[in-house]
Image (tube, rainbow, N blue to C red):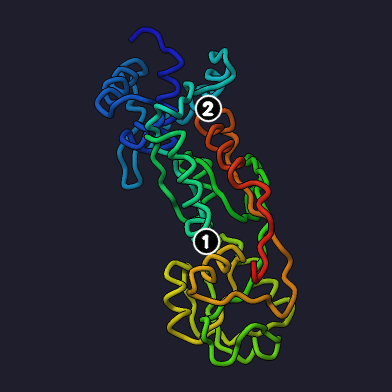
């Protein structure tokens, strides 16, 4: 190999982001053996291993780390179309996308989104990852394409786009022995509660607001996610605060009753987030457009709707 082309630079960038040759397959459009052969030629060209296998994956050598800023600049200079990645054709693409979602998003937003994506991109693959305190690092490294939810810790280097506004309701089993059709502050505080313990999600904001308002719940059960929530609620007298769209879904299924909270909690905005490294990636741009078209400006949901 005497000369490098744009594809060689993109290959090095994607392997570095994925920390794996196999995980880079979905982004570069080559088979794993083809990537390995091309990487071997690049190693000969530079006279350096470029990547070394470690317990954390394929890590760049110091030599390659020193080249990466220059590789980024070269990609921008060599790319005449303003897009450092190949074009994206949704009808034929087999690319795998990774979405960071809260458990509420997985239960409420993902089913509708998947139905829409399957109609226009039948062969793409979606991996849903939990949205947590590590999501920012995953977006930066390319291990996550988009994060959809509520986040407060994404700062320099991230883009964001508002999708819709969400608020909270209180749910309990439909035949709760003491609560039917309305909920007073005294009645709320007299009950036992289920609470979500999920750092890096919007629920951290909720807990802070409750503390500031002096609302001291008797929390007898803490869970790391709301997956399986309906089974817990239906088998107990516990109360839980959940996003209104989840409350509406459970109420319509007859698995819970959703009531207005007897105190004020400000609504919050659900947004999609992505890192500036992938702002012009054709596939990422397409996915963001689909998410925005299908999830933006949803009307607020209130108890009884």
Residue projecting furthest to the top:
2
Residue projecting furthest to the left:
33
* Apparent side of residue 303 relative to residue 102 in the rendered image (left or right): right
Give 214 or 36, whichever is nearer the viewer: 214
**N-terminal label among 2 and 1:** 1
> Compared with residue 101, is residue 81 higher up or lower down, i.e. above or below?
above
- The residue depicted at 32 percent of the width and 23 percent of the height is 39
Give 82 or 141, whichever is nearer the viewer: 82
Percent coordinates x, y for residue 74 in the rendering: 53, 18
* Apparent side of residue 139 relative to residue 266 in the rendered image (left or right): left
Task: Quadrant for residue 276, please give it.
Answer: top right
* Apparent side of residue 222 relative to residue 96 in the rendered image (left or right): right
Q: Residues at badges 2 and 1 in contact (C-beta under 8 Å)?
A: no
Percent coordinates x, y for residue 255 in the rendering: 48, 74
Q: Which mark is residue 276?
A: none
Q: Which mark is residue 282?
A: 2
Q: Residues within 10 Å of mark 1 (few under 14, many from 20)?
A: some
For the image, the number of numbered tags is 2
> Compared with residue 254, is residue 88 higher up or lower down, i.e. above or below?
above
**Mark 1 element type:** helix
Q: CA distance from mark 2 to mark 1?
A: 28 Å
Marks 2 and 1: which is nearer the front?
Answer: 1
- The residue depicted at 66 percent of the width and 60 percent of the height is 166
Q: Quadrant of the N terminus?
A: top left
**Mark 2 element type:** helix
Residue carrying label 1:
104
Percent coordinates x, y for residue 186 in the rendering: 69, 90
Q: Quadrant of the C terminus?
A: bottom right
Percent coordinates x, y for residue 300 in the rendering: 69, 59
- The residue depicted at 50 percent of the width and 31 percent of the height is 283
Q: Residues within 10 Å of mark 2 (few under 14, many from 20)?
A: some
């Amino acid at each position: 190999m005497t000369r490098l082309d744009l594809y060689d630079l993109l290959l090095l960038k994607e392997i570095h982001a994925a920390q794996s040759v196999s995980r880079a397959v979905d982004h570069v459009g080559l088979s794993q053996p083809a990537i390995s052969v091309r990487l071997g030629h690049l190693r000969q060209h530079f006279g350096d291993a470029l990547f070394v296998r470690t317990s954390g994956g394929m890590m760049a050598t110091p030599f390659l780390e020193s080249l990466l800023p220059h590789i980024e600049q070269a990609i921008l200079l060599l790319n005449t179309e303003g897009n450092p990645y190949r074009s994206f054709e949704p009808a034929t693409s087999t690319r795998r996308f990774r979405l960071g979602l809260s458990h509420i998003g997985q239960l409420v937003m993902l089913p509708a989104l998947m139905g829409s994506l399957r109609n226009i991109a039948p062969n793409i693959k979606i991996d849903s990852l939990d949205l947590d305190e590590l999501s920012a690092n995953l977006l930066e490294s390319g291990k996550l394409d988009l994060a959809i939810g509520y986040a407060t810790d994404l700062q320099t280097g991230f883009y964001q786009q508002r999708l819709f506004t969400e608020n909270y309701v209180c749910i309990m089993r439909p035949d709760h022995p003491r609560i039917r059709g309305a909920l007073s502050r005294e009645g709320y505080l007299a009950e036992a509660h289920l609470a979500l313990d999920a750092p890096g999600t919007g629920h951290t904001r909720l807990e802070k607001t409750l503390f500031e308002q002096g609302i001291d719940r008797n929390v007898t059960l803490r869970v790391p996610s709301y997956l399986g929530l309906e089974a817990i609620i239906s088998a107990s007298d516990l109360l839980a605060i959940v996003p209104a769209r989840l409350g509406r879904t459970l109420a319509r299924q007859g698995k819970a009753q959703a009531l207005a909270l007897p105190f004020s909690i400000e609504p919050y905005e659900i947004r999609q987030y992505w890192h500036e490294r992938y702002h012009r990636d054709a596939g990422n741009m397409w996915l963001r457009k689909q998410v925005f078209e299908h999830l933006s400006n949803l009307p607020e949901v209130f108890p009884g709707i």
